[in-house]
Amino acid sequence: MFETLRQLLWSNDLIYATLRLATPLLFAALGGLMCERAGVINIGLEGLMLGGALAGYLVALKTGNPWLGLLAAAVAGLLAAALFAVVVITFRANQIVAAVGLNILMLGLTGVALRAAIGLSQGQTPAPTIPIWKIPGLGDLPFVGPVLFAHLPLVYIVFVLVALVAFVFYRTTWGLAVRAVGEHPRAAETVGINVIRVRYLTVLWSGILAGVGGAMLSIGYLNTFQEGMTAGRGFIAFSAIIFGRWTPLGTMLASLLFGFADALQLRIQAFGVNIPYQFLVMLPYVVTLLALFGVGRSKAPAASGVPYVPGEE
Amino acid sequence: MTAFLRAEEITKIFPGVVANDRITIEVESGEIHALLGENGAGKTTLVNILYGLHRPDSGRIVLRGQEVQLRSSRDAIALGIGMVHQHFMLVPPLTVAENIVLGMPSPREPLLDLRPASREISRLSQTYGLEVDPSARVWQLSVGMQQRVEIIKALYRGADLLILDEPTAVLTPQEIGDLFNNLRRLKAEGHAVIFISHKLDEVMEISDRVTVLRDGRLVNTVDTAKTDKASLARMMVGRDVLFRLEKPPVTPGEAVLKVNGLRVMNDRGQTAVGGVSFDICRGEILGVAGVAGNGQRELVEAIAGLRPVVGGEINLGDHMTTYLQPGDLLDLNLAHIPEDRQKVGLVMEFSVSENLVARLFSRLPFARNGFLFLDVIRQNADRLIKEFDIRVPHAEVKARALSGGNQQKVVLARELSREPDLILAAQPTRGLDVGATEFVEHRILDQRSRGAAILYVSTELEEILSLSDRIAVMHRGEIMGVVRPGEVSEEELGLMMAGEKRRS
Ligand SMILES: Nc1ncnc2c1ncn2[C@@H]1O[C@H](COP(=O)(O)OP(=O)(O)O)[C@@H](O)[C@H]1O
Ligand SMILES: [Mg+2]
């Protein structure tokens, strides 16, 4: 028993899979983090990821180039986020309701678009995928090489992005403006910051990153698209922001935790432990719930979810 | 010599109100220019226009002899206009330095570099005697400190004209003294200052000229040295104002409220009220004096059932009410005029008519079996709006849209129209102008004549002295003594407020 547990947890595979599974979450979460800090709650990450997943698959399939697929995923996320931004920032719709609408829209739209593009029969046509890039030198190190340095390039990029987002938040005037807009938009406006513009740009950014995170699922780890294939990962990414207390580092750690939970359940399944797999599949979601209980009342940016009405109205 | 700023024939119309009606005002460099007027007179609207936050419907603004267009506050800042808003525009989780540089290009754009800013802040602090710690977080600062940050923020942006919208409303007398010294120094350095207030003493003390607004119109601009309080008050209110209250004689009846050894904690779990005892009788006003934050708020909340009692006893009439909830106390005819009318006294998103039944809506005559009688609620609103002279277009406007004075009238109307036995009035005139203050004080005196027992908390000594039958002075949660207004000097009261017990 004890030995089994040791084998289960103490393995290179588990660490490798944790990084692999955390990365799509972290992409979406880093996007969401930026717009949440500007005061826009974005539970539409789920739909944005799904849009990215489909666009990535279709374009990779049609052009034969996975990198073009990735670019398309970013553009798809951007366009869907632009729609969301118009609705919640310009028309000041309730952000939660609009995001739920976006998620349903993307679920339906991706299903229809898939069929329209490749017909009913060929749902399984494999697309070219983004190749793994073993970092020269580092990738050949014993033990750590294969675990840490033989991933999709996006895995390395996302951790660079964490540092970059942290830098932007705390070391640039733009980051200061974003933080101010999320806390007290009126104060930001009185010193000449364009609140609406800041919010638009951060929401668009969240679309790009969530789209890329989605594409990782379809043309990173698989070579196909399935309806609803994000399976709640956008919501988990959203939770990672909260569990991470709206900081880049915290969001990264939370994403790793949720990625770990997912890796663990896959590994338990592979081990053939006698637990119905349905329960195992629930594990990441249960961990997410428990984590959110655990954070208690952590403080969101003060203006979260409140549409901004500029002064002259 | 041309004026530093001249706003000509400024008109601003909001749906249903002419907030500014052809107002002309001139401000010189090296001048402190007071803008005086009752709540709703249009002071904030006018300065918002000067700061580019509102666009006037007509009129023009001439700055340093040239006509300017102010499309946003960015334009105003660039032209050397700075403003300290009535509600501070600071971001609480950010540091002082971050708040001050917010929205300004950094010397190492796009990188944020706070070091040169911190140096400049220190320099401004020294020049104008505005002491602040650039690395402190704003939420940790007292209100007076936050105001200094706002002033430095404007100066950092190179303001030649500084607009302060009701800057003294939130300050202690000590802090007001400091602010005035700072303003005098700014004036000596050649800055122009627009100082908004409705307190006549302050205007007389600090300003060189006064412009008086009433109902959106300009009444007059006068030299402060050539006018006096009475004529300013007349211009502001449009009639003569009595500065001394006429207090009708009332013979106090039996005790209504008996408080014995009451102990209450503050929000942080420290003792806020440390064993106080007193009685209040029918037809009597017990004034509670003291510097803000010495347990007055907790005392009132405990009696109102809003804060748990950890020791002692409260009796209302024949009932022991120590552990009762606000709803139960309502049945015992207790009225509460809370300190914070916007958060506690009113539901800002509800209409005036709804707010007028806010504590009573679930019972007769306003409802039965869970169904509201809307026509009764509407009639109730119409009657109270007339009776308490609440200035609203109609009863269905949201409380948020009302001026402070009218908001307080809604609270008074709801609480006093039930003819309560006990009234807890916590700073009921705070932030109100002469007219509204007078109104509140008269209503309280009417209740006293009717036979209500009244606990009246105020930090303004003058008000306590003129209203109270007896005065309890609080210091660090204890009562330093109970005195009668005729038998005590302001100096003696001041000493008690500072913690000296009265020997008697
Ligand atoms: N944004 C606004 N929308 C509609 N009415 C307003 C607005 N701001 C002020 N008002 C109205 O304009 C009048 C003047 O208000 P204000 O300038 O705030 O007065 P003051 O600062 O002298 O108390 C009031 O009747 C107020 O209700
Ligand atoms: Mg005002």
Image: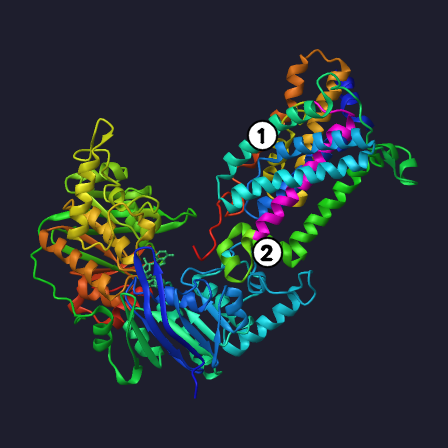
Residue B487 in sight here: yes
Chain of the residue that carries numbered disc 1 in the rendered image:
A
Left or right of A57 on screen, residue B290: left
From this view, report whether residue B373 is shown above or below residue A313.
above
Residue B329, percent from left and from top: 22, 39
Q: Nearer the viewer, mark 2 or mark 1?
A: 1
Could you tell me what secondary structure mostly forms the magenta stretch? helix
Q: Between marks 2 and 1, how big is the CA–CA gap?
A: 32 Å
Q: Residues within 10 Å of mark 1 (few under 14, many from 20)?
A: some
Residue placed under numbered mark 2 in the picture: A177
Say which quarter of the image contains residue B172: bottom left
* Residue A222 x/y as whole percent: 77, 25
Judging depth in this view, the residue of A51 and A145 nearest the camera is A51
Judging by the rendered image, the residue that carries numbered circle 1 is A105
Q: What residue is at 20 percent from the left and 33 percent from the top?
A: B373
Nearest the viewer among A242 and B195 is B195
Q: Which residue is depicted at the point 49% across and 70% down?
A: B69
Which region of the structure is painted magenta?
Answer: A197-226
Amino acid bearing label 2: Ala
- Which chain does the residue under circle 2 lie in? A
Q: What amino acid does circle 1 point to?
A: Leu
- Whole-percent x, y for residue A309 in the image: 46, 51
> Quick one: A187 or A49, which is closer to the camera?
A49
Asked where in the image residue B291 lies, by quadrant, the reply is: bottom left
In the rendered image, which quarter contains the C terminus of chain B? bottom left
Q: Earlier in the sequence, mark 2 or mark 1?
A: 1
